[in-house]
Image (cartoon, helix red, strand yellow):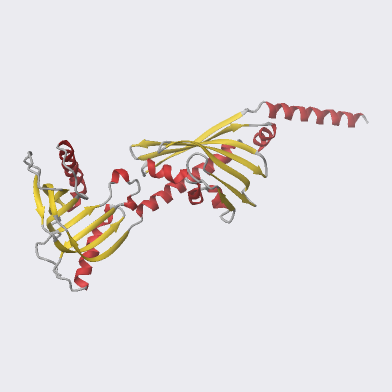
Amino acid sequence: MKFLKYLLFLILILIIGIAIYVAVQPNTYDFSRSRVIKAPASMLYNKVNDYKNWKEFSPWIEQEPNATLTYDNKTKGIDGGYSWSGKILGEGNMKTTGITPNKSIAQDINFIKPFEGGAKINWSFEPSPDGTKVTWAMNGEQDFMTKAFTAFMGTIEKTTGPQFERGLIKLDSVTLQDMKKYSIKTQGITEHGGGFYLYNTSSCKISDLPTKMAEMMPKLTAYAKKNNITMAGSPYVLYHKVDNENGTAMFSCCIPTEARVITTEKDILSGELKPFSALQITLKGNYTNLKEAWEKAMQHISKNNIEQIKDGVMLESYATDPSNTPNPADYLTNIYIAVKK
């Protein structure tokens, strides 16, 4: 009988000890994971801000891709939300509570099954020399049952942190894949209207074209802005001579104008492009795909017995402004090659 009393007493002490151990665990938790992604902050912000995109990078949906996802009428911005239900995921929902466009997103996450609970989620998107530093953070309070679970099964950071890391890796992967998408479409023979334009001219190695253009085009736009000159269309590059054998090119960066402009700087001139018939090729995607677009244009000319005009116009017209288009996959470039009708 004494043995039973001692045993019960020891069990009681053990229970009290465990309760005290659980009770002194932290009342709150707060942790984050970060990753630098080579993509614009605005593009990453847009990906995270819309819950319809979460199935692309959520590490939990990856574990149960057949889980039921139910979207609110609004899925992005403040009050945007969605909920989930699954055998592995359980039940829960998320709601966006605050945003600073392209900089941060605040969210509430609520768990219903297999246990009830809630937490605050915060995202930040900071410019970095190598792209954008994306930080995924979580914080919340721990009741006694949560303390008991984490005391013996590991902290919430220990169990959830690796999932955040996996999610950021997936976000990196799907975003870079989105940026690489492109298409090349042959529009056929069209009529280019020509027109007046401002231009500056240079020559360089073909491999240096992007760098050289990036120096020249801003000088033109700055001159136009300074002198209140209205741009009459998309900026373009006019190729005068391309020597593929030696890897060099002579070209002009051009801004179309409504009328002829008398310029006041010796390296910025005014010209006129006469209307011409052209084969038009449209590239939707990053400028790195322009080489392939030009190759397809030349192949189309050869295959269809189209007569290209010797020393005729060859130009690239940039229909989108990269500064207002975060995803390079959305860039639009039209190639025009002068041909005989």
Residue 192 visible to an observer of this rendering: yes
At a point 13% along the width and 53% down the height, the residue shown is 195
User: The C terminus is located in which quarter?
Assistant: bottom left
Tell me where residue 334 appears, x and y as whole percent.
24, 57
- Res. 248 in view: no
Q: Is residue 167 left or right of residue 264?
A: right
Q: Is residue 127 left or right of residue 231?
A: right
The image quarter in which residue 228 lies: top left
Q: Quadrant of residue 315?
A: bottom left
Q: Quick one: 136 or 300, which is closer to the camera?
A: 300
User: What is the tally of numbered marks visible in this picture?
Assistant: 0
Spot occupied by residue 16 in the image (x, y as percentages of width and height):
77, 27
Residue that protrudes farthest toward the right in the picture: 1
Q: Position of residue 102 (x, y in %)?
A: 40, 38
> Which residue occupies the extreme front position in the image?
259
Q: At 31% across and 54% down in the image, what residue appears?
A: 285
Q: Is residue 338 left or right of residue 30?
A: left
User: Can you give x and y, in whole percent of width and height, for residue 181 in the image?
Assistant: 36, 56
Q: Nearer the viewer, residue 334 or 286?
A: 334
For residue 74, above or below residue 316: above
Q: Which image quarter holds the N terminus?
A: top right
